[in-house]
């Protein structure tokens, strides 16, 4: 069941990234999706709290949740920049495959997760294939502007950061629903402040594509709900690998 949840979540994740790629105003499209997803997650968290589920058993769990929210905000900002400057296939491959590369050793060190020689070899081969496909087949190597690649690398680090932070929050007593709600809300506030700051200096010449924002928001909501269930059920390395590799 865990694998099914991961695969479905990965599908919606890739789909809303694809929709964001064709959105002219990526920053505002992202903020719209984050805000609606945060409201959705907050309602679920509030209902579960009312039913008797404690949101945070320790201050440490709350701290990890806030750190996850900060990493989420960095993720949204770097994702928007990467998609503005690079092709979807390459950006998505580098950001997701790179996150696996970061999560792998840290999950072993921080959470004492065991990786067998067989799974390690298979993961390394798949990761190498993803990177080669993304960089070679999508023309990044021949592009004059490689800034999209570096933004994707930063995006990968932030993705790994919020995955590890979420796992640490759950291990130290956070409710999955409360952790997602608080972290997404924090990332929404940070992202709104960033976009408002940018809009003071720069106003996009192209009108925003409203339907793309609506669809991206819908898929972000589905992703956040499934992601909550996924983190409750499995170890961080395997979940991150399946989610990103798919």
Image: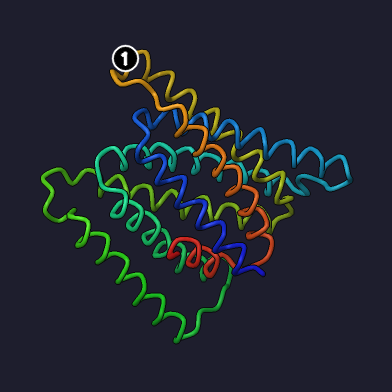
The local crowd at label 1, few if under 14, some if 14 to 19, many if 20 or more residues have their Cα within 10 Å, is few
Secondary element at tag 1: helix
User: x, y percentage for residue 233?
Assistant: 68, 65
- Answer left or right for 214 relative to 245: right
Q: Is residue 220 above or below residue 6?
A: above
**Quadrant in which the N terminus appears:** bottom right
Most foreground residue, 171 or 11: 11
User: x, y percentage for residue 51?
Assistant: 88, 44
What residue is rendered at 63% in x and 54% in y? Answer: 226
What residue is rendered at 37% in x and 34% in y? Answer: 23
Q: Residue furthest top?
A: 200
Q: Is residue 167 above or below residue 4?
A: above
Most foreground residue, 101 or 32: 32
What residue is rendered at 75% in x and 48% in y? Answer: 58
- How are the colours assigned in the image? rainbow
Q: Which quadrant of the figure has residue 128? A: bottom left
Most foreground residue, 21 or 85: 21
User: x, y percentage for residue 68?
Assistant: 56, 45
- Residue located beneath label 1 in the image: 201
- Answer left or right for 157 relative to 229: left
What residue is rendered at 56% in x and 56% in y? Answer: 9
- Answer left or right for 31 relative to 5: left
How many discs mark residues in the rendered view?
1
User: x, y percentage for residue 194?
Assistant: 43, 25
Q: Is residue 24 above or below residue 141?
A: above
Q: Residue furthest front?
A: 211
**Quadrant in which the C terminus appears:** bottom left
Q: Is residue 98 above or below residue 185?
A: below
């Amino acid at each position: 069941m865990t694998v099914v949840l991961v695969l479905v979540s990965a599908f919606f994740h890739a789909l809303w990234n694809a929709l964001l790629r064709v959105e002219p105003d990526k920053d505002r499209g992202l903020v719209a999706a984050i805000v609606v997803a945060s409201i959705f997650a907050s309602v679920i968290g509030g209902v579960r709290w009312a039913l008797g589920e404690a949101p945070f058993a320790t201050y440490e769990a709350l701290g990890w949740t806030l750190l996850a929210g900060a990493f989420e905000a960095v993720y949204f900002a770097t994702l928007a920049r990467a998609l503005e400057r690079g092709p979807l296939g390459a950006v998505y491959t580098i950001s997701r495959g790179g996150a696996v590369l970061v999560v792998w050793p840290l999950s072993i060190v921080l959470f004492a997760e065991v990786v067998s020689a067989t799974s390690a070899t298979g993961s390394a081969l798949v990761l190498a294939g993803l990177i080669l496909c993304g960089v070679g087949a999508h023309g990044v190597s021949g592009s004059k502007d490689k800034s999209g690649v570096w933004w994707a690398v930063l995006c990968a680090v932030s993705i790994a950061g919020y995955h590890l932070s979420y796992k640490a929050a759950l291990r130290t007593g956070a409710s999955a629903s409360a952790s997602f709600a608080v972290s997404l809300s924090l990332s929404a506030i940070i992202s709104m402040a960033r976009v408002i700051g940018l809009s003071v200096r720069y106003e996009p010449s192209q009108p925003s594509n409203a339907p793309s924002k609506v669809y991206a928001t819908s898929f972000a909501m589905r992703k956040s709900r499934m992601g909550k269930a996924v983190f409750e059920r499995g170890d961080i390395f395997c979940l991150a690998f399946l989610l990103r590799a798919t």
